[in-house]
Every structure is written in C-alpha cells, then in structure tokens.
Amino acid sequence: MKHRLHVLACAAVCSSMVATPLLAATPTTLGTPEGKLNIIAWPGYIERGETDKNYDWVTQFEKNTGCQVSVKTAATSDEMVSLMNSPNYDLVTASGDASLRLIYGKKVQEINPNLIPSWNTLDPRVKNGNWYTVGGKVYGTPYQWGANFLMYNTKLYPTAPTSWAAVFEPGKLANGQSNKGKVQAYDGAIYIADAALYLMSKNPALGIKDPYELNETQYQAVLQLLRQQKQLAHRYWHDVTVQMNDFKKEGVAASSAWGYTINTLQGENFPVAGVIPKEGATGWADTTMLHAKAQHPVCAYKWMEWSLNKNLQSSLAEWFGSNPVVADACKTKAPGGSDFCKSNGFDRFAQIRFWKTPIATCKTQGTCVPYSRWTSDYIAIMGGR
Amino acid sequence: MMTASLPVTPAAPALGLWQRLGVALYRRPGLQLGLLLGLPLLWFLVVYIGSLATLLAQSFFTFDDFTMEVSRELTLANYRQLLQPANFDVVLRTLLMASAVSLASAVLAFPLAYYMVRYARGWKKGFFYVAVMLPMWASYIVKVYAWTVLLAKDGMVYWAYQHLGLGGVMDWLMTLPLLGGNSLTTSHLGRFAVFTYIWLPFMILPVQAALERVPANLLQASSDLGANGAQTFRHVILPLAFPGVVAGSIFTFSLTLGDYIIPQIIGPSGLFIGSMVYTMQGSIGNMPLAAAFTVVPVVIIALYLTGARKLGAFDAL
C-alpha cells in the first residue's frame, strides 16, 4: 500500500523533476517570525476582506505576528501539487487527493503539533486523519472539510430531493416536465465515486464498501449508471461560474455542487438549496501543509496556530460553505449569522466519503480499478460511448 | 624644396576599437554570421526544437496503468491507444470543428476583406480596420464567458429568435444530430459560433493583405477583354487572393485544433485534443499519452502546411 502510494505520488509529482528530499529537522521551539508567509490556497480560502470586508482573517494575523501574507490561488489539486515543486511557498491547503501525493513526494515536511497550542481543540473526528498522518507522523494542520452537495432548484423541487436518484435516474420535475436535459454531473473522473456511492445503497448486492475502491464488476455497474446519466445530462460542469449561469439561465434543476456555489446563488436570491441526500455524499478534507523547504517556517507555524482559532474557523465555514475542524467554532457567531454547521453537514461527518485517489491495490478488495482507467472511461462516457 | 613638393604619405590613422572590430568581422564573414544568428538560433534549437524532441521522445515512453508510473521503456502503445474509439473520437471531433471553423471564417472574411480593400475609403477604411482588430484587444476569457450568457436559454439569442417568431426553428435545429444539444450553449452549433467569432480576425487580415496585392490594372485588363464581374472574380481575383485564404486558414485551423478553453465552457461534453492533453497530463500524470495526443496536431498541421506551401500561402503571410 505504502509502496503503491509512493509510486502513485511519484507519477504525478516527480515525473518532471527528481525529488531530492531536503527535510529540515522538525523544530521543537520557534524563533522570531520571518516577516513573510506565502500560501497556496483554494480561491476564497484565505480572505483579507477584499471581496467582502466582513470576511477577513488575514489582517489581524499580520498585525499580531508581523508576517505579511501573500496568497497564490490554485483551481485544482493537480495545480497545487505542481506549484509545490517551487520552494517559494511555505504552506498549501491541500485536499485529500493531493495531500498523500505531497507527503510521498516529499514536498511537505512533518510538523510538531506541540508547537501549535490549539492542537488539542481539534475536532476528535479529524485528529490523526489518515489523509495527513502517515506512520504516526503528522504532516500539517487540518483546515476545513466539506461535502459535494446535491444542489436543486427549489421551484422545480418544492420538497427537497432525498436521494442522488435526482441526478442519476429519469424522473419528473414539479412542473410536470421530465428531468431529461435538466441535470448536471461533474466533469472530473473522481465523479465516478459519486455514482458508486449511489449504487452502494441502491444495489447492496454489488458489495461496494468504499466508492473509491471498486472491483471490475462493481466498476462496470457504475459505468452503466453513468451512461444512463449521460442521457439525462444537460452538461458536465467544470467551471463554477458556468454552472451558476446554467442554473440561472438554462433551467437546470439538479446537480452536484460545492457549498460555495449554493451560497453564492442564494446570495443573489436565486431559488436553490443544497442537501446531503440519504446515501451520503463525497467530500473533501483539507490540510494546511508545510513545504519541505519552507523559507518562513516560524510564520508558517504561527499561521497554523492562527488557522485553528474559532473565529476564523466559523467565518471561513460560513464563507466557503465548509465545516470547521474545531468543534467550538459551530457555536461561534459568523459574520452572516447563519447556522453554517447545520447547513454544511457538520453532524454528518460519518456520511461523507472523502476524496482520495483510487489505486490498484486497495484495502477492501485486494485489486481495484486504478484512477488512470477511471479517467479514460469517464472521458469515453462524456463523449457519448 | 624638393622634399617639400614630394607627396607625403600620411601615417595611417590609428583605428579605434570599434573600427578594428569591424575590420576583423569583415574579414571573417563566418564569425559575423555566427554572432548575428548564434543566440536566436540557440534559442530556437533549445527551446523550440528541443522541447518538441522531448515531446516526441515522451510519447514513446511506457505508462503503467497499474502503478501509474512512467518508465523509459520504448513502446508504441500510446499511439495504438489513439486509435481506440473513445480517443479517436476526440481527434475526429477536434479535426471536424477546426475544418468547419476555417471554412466558415473564410466564407465570412472574404466579402468583408474585399469591401475593405476595394470600396472602403478614408474614415471607413480606418473604421473597418479598428472594428476587425478591436475584439482581439479584449480578453479572450471574458469574450467566451460573455457568449455563455448570450447563448443561454434565457439569453439574447433565444430572445431574438422568439421575438422574430423563429423559436420553432431553433428548437428544430437543436434536435439535429450533429449540430444540436440541450440548448445553444451546450450544442456543437454554439461552440462552432464562438470559435468562428474568436478566430475570424485571423482570417480577415491575411485575406485582406492578399486582396490588397491584386493589381488594379489586372482587373481593368480583364474587363477590357470582355470578362464580366463574375468571370473576373473567378479567374482573376480568386486565384490571386486564394493564398491569403489558405494563410488565414493556417491560423484558424491550428488555433481551433489547439484550443482547450472554449470546449470546456461552451458546447456538449466530449473532450477536444487540448482538453484531453490537459486531463492526461494534469490529473493522472499520463505524460506519454498526453505527448502522443500532442503529436497529432503537430502532424496534422505539418501536412496542412505542406499543402498550404504548394498553394503559395506563405507568400501571403
């Protein structure tokens, strides 16, 4: 398993350059802050009040520590992994499908949780998570987690759909029309896991235990479901802006979507809502990881400590549509005053299947269909084959 | 006295550093050429040819599906994979779109360029030049996103069709197998329209340059010899301007062939060569297959350029 992952990591990370691990010893004390901090983050993850002045968790940090924060946003996990080839960055907010690649590619270094006083306030459910803890070593600080919601138009679904069947099976909308051409699916191969998750409860006889670990029979059943969905699909969404436009202008009724998309559309008073259906949902758990050659490690540790404060966690969760990793943050009022923990599925952690890269040697089955085949088959399905 | 009248050869004036350098270079034309072309040539060899060679080499490496690891064992498997139906679809889809876009651009560009050259004078000429160039100054991404709004079901294009009483025509168009889709934004027709819009200026300019060079006296001679307008057009203007059309199509064809942004934003699902390369390289690290896919447009364009050269397109660039 470990070896496979290593190889997997290398396929993505060191294909262009040979990784020369230059791991600094994990520090036991912190010196004076270096005055600068460079972070790679998802868009909307590190806000300094430039989009909305109420959502600002950088300015105070800069005042407290004297570390000037600059943020480089990345749109995909792959982009994050490749940006981390550069030693100019100190931290990265990596999702589960990138974090292990970074660890095995030796792009990030082990951290010392004792230097992060708020470590003990972490939600026990994310403590020691296998997406950032390897062999007892801790590679980063949990940041946030979230689900891929089922977003629906509340005019076309006056009562919330309870199952992912809304996007996988032919059906009728509230206006009497068929849902053909009114649903969307994500255009990344990782979406195969969403279909697997649905089949897991729809067809228990298949014996799917983990939607990222599928044997040949299960995999074929999942592909068949996706081919059926292709007949219903309006489009495979790739771009959040285009997806929002499709809901507003094209009459799309239901799709998988991010909390951010739902929040934005609701902010424009467009009638949509998001649910985590009864089957559960796929999701992501992000970790702030320290670059192996970080040039500003003290500022980085200061940020990791700062990132766990409950005000930041609650504002961020409300802003991004995600969940805090510090349980107390749910009771902390966010600028918008919403009950974000409830709407973002904080209590449904167990029902979220977090993103990970499917590999050939898997725990639940022995041999599974690897991600490279997921990609080529999903391309074929999107192309109508 | 005698000596005074003798012409005195003046001592050769001492040459400055630059002059001596000039003389030295003059005597060694090889060195001169080397200094002049060395750097650009090195740049060209290393950056262009070098990366192309690396690309070609990569396309023969082995990608192990099981371990997802690239090894340097040479294989033809990547090229065989190109022929798999799903992958071949990608190539065919891209190729058809590139051809259709080039053809449509030529049809739209020719009359416009002809008017610009033969009829527009004074401020009109300036206006047309600016009008053709102006869209190229705006951000490509902004324009493409704008089209998603225009082509949406609640967008302007549908609105216009509805008000012209042509809503039925649009619905019928969308049911056609090769053009249609759920709506204009998710149809091949919509994608084709956006591609044509984006690349049209690249066709107009070379065509206009070629028309500019058709001598007016040939047209007079043609009419003196009794040819009517249509004949002059067919036998004089078109053959002389055709290299310009081919030159323009080099742009529209290769730009469409390589684009990976428009296919992601507008049109039905199903990848283009560019988005396929992006996926293969980006999300699964299958560099060899990505490289093999990249070789496809290189080969197509090479063939295309060979043909274009025969048609004299390079004189019109």
Image (cartoon, grey):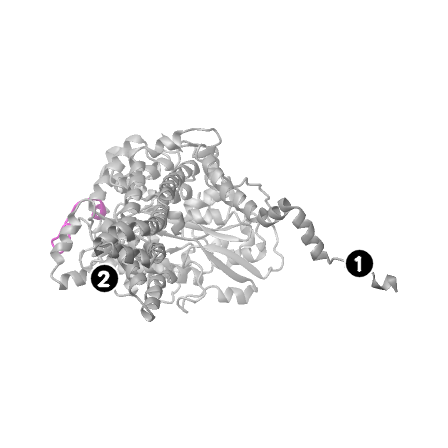
User: Label 1 crowding class (10 Å Cα cut-off): few <14, some 14-19, many 20+?
Assistant: few
Secondary structure under tag 2 reads: loop
Quadrant holding the N terminus of chain A: top left
| Res. A352 in view | yes
Q: Residue at 49% across / 66% down in the picture?
A: A59
Is residue B174 found left or right of B79 in the rendered image?
A: left
Residue B70 appears at what percent x and percent y?
46, 34
Q: Residue at 60% across / 59% down in the picture?
A: A34
Q: Chain of mark 1?
A: B
Which amino acid, by three-letter code, is at mark 2? Pro
Q: Is residue A170 magenta?
A: yes
Is residue A316 found left or right of A84 in the rendered image?
A: left
Quarter holding residue A353 = top left
Is residue B176 found left or right of A263 in the rendered image?
A: left
Q: Nearer the viewer, mark 1 or mark 2?
A: 1
Residue A65 appears at what percent x and percent y?
56, 64
User: Label 2 crowding class (10 Å Cα cut-off): few <14, some 14-19, many 20+?
Assistant: some
Inter-mark Cα distance, 1 to 2:
100 Å
Secondary structure under tag 1 reads: loop
Q: Residue at 53% across / 41% down in the picture?
A: A17
Q: Which residue is mark 1?
A: B9
| Res. B154 in view | no
Residue A65 drawn above or below residue B194: below
Q: Which residues are magenta?
A: A165-178
Residue A284 drawn above or below residue A310: above
Which amino acid, by three-letter code, is at mark 1? Thr
Residue A169 appears at what percent x and percent y?
19, 44
- Residue toward you, A371 or A352: A371
On residue A271, the disc is 2
- Furthest residue to the front? B2
